Amino acid sequence: MLHEILLSLSGQPSSLFSTQKGENAVTQDDFPLLSPPEKALLASVAHLSRLHAQLRKYASHISSTSPSVICRSVSTVIVGTHLGEFQKKILEVERAILAEDSGYVGGYGIVPLSTIVGEFAPWTRRMEWLWAVIRFIQPERKSTGILHGSTGAALIDHLRAEAQTGYLDIKEMALQLATAAETAWMKQLSMWLLYGNLPIYGKEDFFIQEDTEKENEEAQFSVNVRLLPGFVTAQTAGSILFIGKSLNHIRAKRKTSIAGTSTAPVTLYREHIEQLAGLKSPISPSKLTTAVDSIRLSLSQSTLSKLLPLPKILEILTLLHNFLLLGRGEFAVALVAHADSRVEESRRRRPSATRPLGKLDILTIKEGDVTAALAEAWAELFSLQKEEDPADEELELARDLLCLSVSGRKGGRPMTPAQTPNSISKISKISFEDLLFPIPTNLTAHIRAPLDLFISSSDIVIYSKIHSYLLGIRRAQIRLGDLWKRTPLRRNHPTPWGPPRSNSVFGQAKLQARRDRDNARVRQMRHIWATGSACLFTLSEIGSFFQGDVVNESWQHLRQWIEGCSSSTVSAPGSRPGTASSSKSHNSSKTLSPESGQQTMGRHDPEALTVAHRRHLSSLVQSLFLTDIPFTNTMRGLLTNIDRFVALLIRLETIQHNMDLETDEGVEDALVDYAHEEREVWEELRATRNDVEAGIKNLVGSLRDIDDSRSGEGLGPAELATNLGQMWPGSRQADSASSGFDHYVPHKAAGVDRLLMKLDFGSLRSGFGPETTASLAGMP
């Protein structure tokens, strides 16, 4: 029976153990003379035998079929090392029995069964643990089907957790398997960090994934957090992604040289290989971060300093600030003016009998109208330049890179974030894209290589959302301000007709009737102008706060950090949007020399600049209240009501002008009843005026809620921006100072209480409040 026991322990099928009556059952018919103690001893042997056979079968299957290289490595070590040691133990026991070792063979050549079972007893716990590891890699079949196998990252984390045990043999085995898993993972990581290529085998299990839905020929990569091992922080993952993307981009452009792009081959530095080879299992998060940062700095100082020079980075950031964030005020004014002219032209092309009052059919605006409006805005900006002025290179670059298009028509699918899919999810879903035109449009920038390493598609999406938001507020200000230029609506001073008609009774009566009519209109319009003035004041203060205290201050803070200048050399910007002349003078005073650029690049490598830029963006999103759904919803409703308010006033001016021609000059139109239309317009205007006033109060109430919530939580804009900045991997915390990194802290914008004080003070001076509104509502 001894040879049957040893053969069964080796994984061979044996008639000693039944496979029909249970897992640990012993055949009764073949061995009827076995006593119950002997059956109990053989039950443990049967259990160990079946574990050995199943381990070898499933581990071999995983080694040959698993898509994960890490899982294959672990299963191979289980078969080759641990099951091999178990097989050696069987051979040692067999050799000792054949040699009649006194430790196994007793008197008269009898080998006690308890001795054999006791010799293999420690292996029961080890085999059960190895079987649990195999089941973790490849779960059992359930009633719903076959579960998906484990990922390599999950297996590494599981083995690291299993090493924290009180059994020394289990801890040693867990460390051996974890070493094999981490070695396989480091080989995949080395391919990415040293060559910029995804691993050939098992790339589906690597945490850097290639985007299969590419909009162009450029490869896009992203971090899959599910495949990220626990010892790799989000900051380190962001640096790994940046290094590999840079190397991949350089190698992709070596065949097709681009102007201004360094196509020199990338050198494999011995220091990089030594840094990775020095990482021993278990890999420490701090040592991995130090190695990745060292490789990143070395690559930045050698290759990326030529690929992404600091002046080019500052040039594209300045362009995005001046045009997408309305830093150049004349661009916003020109774009709004030409967009309104295109809308008005489309309105004239449509028959007025089928056009709803104050509305425009969406189908009348086409892609050509949108493109033509931007082209006319560029032409107007170029016409403002004088011959003696130097060429505005920024304007030329903006015309080449910026594109105004109808949302959903430009590409086959919307742009997705390049690094994390949740980077835009925090922004409110309230859309401001259909304020410039009646259909959704967005202004985007085409980032050319190699700057796409620095600015991702998700950054451009956020810039576009902020632009639509700020432009909607600016457009409402412009349209409200233009109402005061319409003199017939605001005031009218009819002059006497002159003799001889002015001396007649008829002439004097006619003049008096005209004056009475104008006085009645002035009294009737008084509450309309009060509402318009209050609305214009509210939007002006909010717009000045956003443009001056948030956008401009944050940009100056970021630029100062990039250039490394002292705060005393940077002049404080105003709260109003800048112009081309002010922008050029400011840029000329901050031109970087090559020496200063190289020195700054030593402190701020491209990946650190990318992290700082994304922190800057996240700070803007928070400080502009774009993450607050009640505020954005109220703001959108107010801007919509303002558009209708202005459209009704313009329509009222046209109707009153035609009525005056009909009354005073006898110019009649038999197809139109202007008196009836005037009554309808006044009814809608009163309702819209009430909506605008309610929108102003709700907007101020939303600001108070934001102020209360932020002060109650003890969070300022900087803290909120830091929290939002965690959506992007690669941002570093305070411990980065020890590695030689200058951690960027976003600018802390002025509090909401400052804006509320201005709004309260303005409402007191203007007298616009509930009491005034109630008194004006009772006027005819």
Image (cartoon, rainbow, N blue to C red):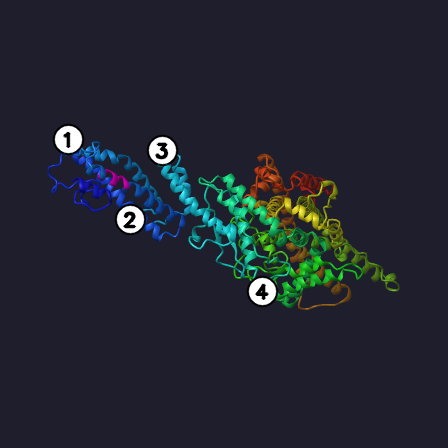
N-term-proximal mark, 4 vs 3: 3
Dot 4 alpha-carbon crowd within 10 angstroms: few under 14, some 14 to 19, many 20 or more = few
- Per the image, the residue denoted by label 3 is 168
Who is closer to the viewer here, 150 or 284?
284
Residue 52, by quadrant, is: top left
Dot 2 alpha-carbon crowd within 10 angstroms: few under 14, some 14 to 19, many 20 or more = few
Q: Which mark is residue 57?
A: 2
Camera sees residue 142: no
Tell me the CA gap for discs 4 and 2: 66 Å
Which numbered disc, 1 or 2, marks the residue closer to the eye?
A: 1
- Per the image, the residue denoted by label 4 is 363
Q: Which residues are magenta?
A: 88-94
Which numbered disc, 1 or 3, marks the residue closer to the eye?
A: 1
- Per the image, the residue denoted by label 1 is 107
Q: Which mark is residue 752?
A: none
Task: Relative to 315, say whether 568 is above or below.
Answer: above
N-term-proximal mark, 2 vs 3: 2
